[in-house]
Amino acid sequence: MQKIKKLSFFVTCLVLVLASAFIFVGCGKDENKIRLNEVTHSIFYAPLYVAYNLGYFEDEGLKVTIESATGSDASMTALISGSADIALIGPEQVVYAENVKDRPVVFGQLTHTDGSFIVGKEYTESFTLDMLRGKTIIGGRAGGLPAMTLEYVIRGAGLTIGTDTANGEVNLRTDVSFPMIASEFTTSNSEYCTLFEPNATTLENAGNGYVLKAVGEFSGKLPYTCFTAKTSFLEKKGEQAEKFLRAVYKGYKYIATQPTSASATALMPSFDGMTQTELEIAVRQYVAIGAWGEMSMEETSFTRLLSVINTTSGTNYAPKFADLIDNSIADRLTAN
């Protein structure tokens, strides 16, 4: 009986040891899983997809899953609720959430200017903002950075926003959801809209409009889309956050150093509906406007962002740059 008890005790201990081993192995794998929620799916985020498709995340030992939302507010909700580890969103959402207990923090900047393009139903070689006078333009969701930036540059051009187009006011529509802008523009009487790639190129190729000008050429440098995580994630999984950002940075360097055709090829698995030529056009357009660069955020750009938010919404947000932006990881990548 004593031997049976000893054997039973030994077996129990062995089971516990093996179970613990499986638990720790499982935890180790979980440590390297990152759930990314992106505000939308766009070539504007090309360095991310290049990193994903060329295996740069796997090279860093990470298993990354990407889920697309329908707006920055939805992505921020996913982040705060814990259904996402990292959100690729407009940094205005971080400003709005500055008082959240587990504060969301930007730890890497992906895009450096507005990535939308003004599309018109009539072609003009030299588009100016004054051409919007007395016209209607569909500018995206109210409160979203694309719509706010567009309003900011329209007002900056000395134009008045309103519905009295007969007297020269610009009717800026913000009642159309992001995925519906192209179809609403095509079927409505709106003379202009703003679209991101690949939608702008696709609409033009379908004969439904002409890509006229990048909004970024009017807005200047802006921290438009950033990688954001909760403070607790950066504290507990700072190593994984650094590996993640390093992989994306490799994607950016690939685009910066390789022919456009190579970048388009690398993007194709993420954009099945587009041709090689269409992808090359989109990449070339974003390179031309300086959409991507080093992944640290400049304080001057952040200050301009606050100006866009406060000017268009009538608010007075004045958070400290150091409270919402952590450039430590991005600075190390640049230094290396």
Image (tube, rainbow, N blue to C red):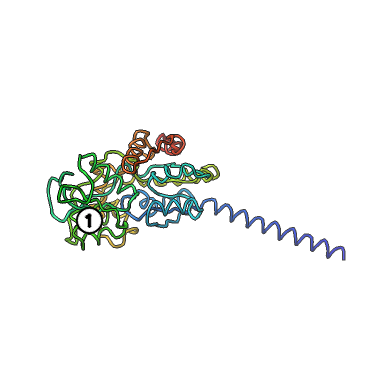
Residue depicted at 24% across the width and 61% down the height:
184
**Percent of width and height locating residue 304:** 33, 37
Left or right of 309 in this view: 182: left
Report crowding for label 1: few under 14, some 14 to 19, many 20 or more residues within 10 A (C-alpha). Answer: many
Q: Nearer the viewer, residue 257 or 94?
A: 94
Q: Nearer the viewer, residue 211 or 59?
A: 211
Q: At label 1, which amino acid type do we have?
A: Thr
Position of the C terminus by quadrant: top left
**Percent of width and height locating residue 136:** 20, 53
Left or right of 65 in this view: 155: left
Left or right of 220 in this view: 80: right
* Quarter of the view holding residue 297: top left
**Percent of width and height locating residue 69:** 39, 57
Residue depicted at 63% across the width and 57% down the height:
22
**Percent of width and height locating residue 52:** 40, 53
Write down the residue under mark 1.
201
How many callouts does the rendering have?
A: 1
Q: Secondary structure at mark 1?
A: helix
* Above or below, comparing residue 22 to residue 255 in the picture: below
* Above or below, comparing residue 100 to residue 63 in the picture: above
Position of the N terminus by quadrant: bottom right
Q: Nearer the viewer, residue 285 or 204?
A: 204
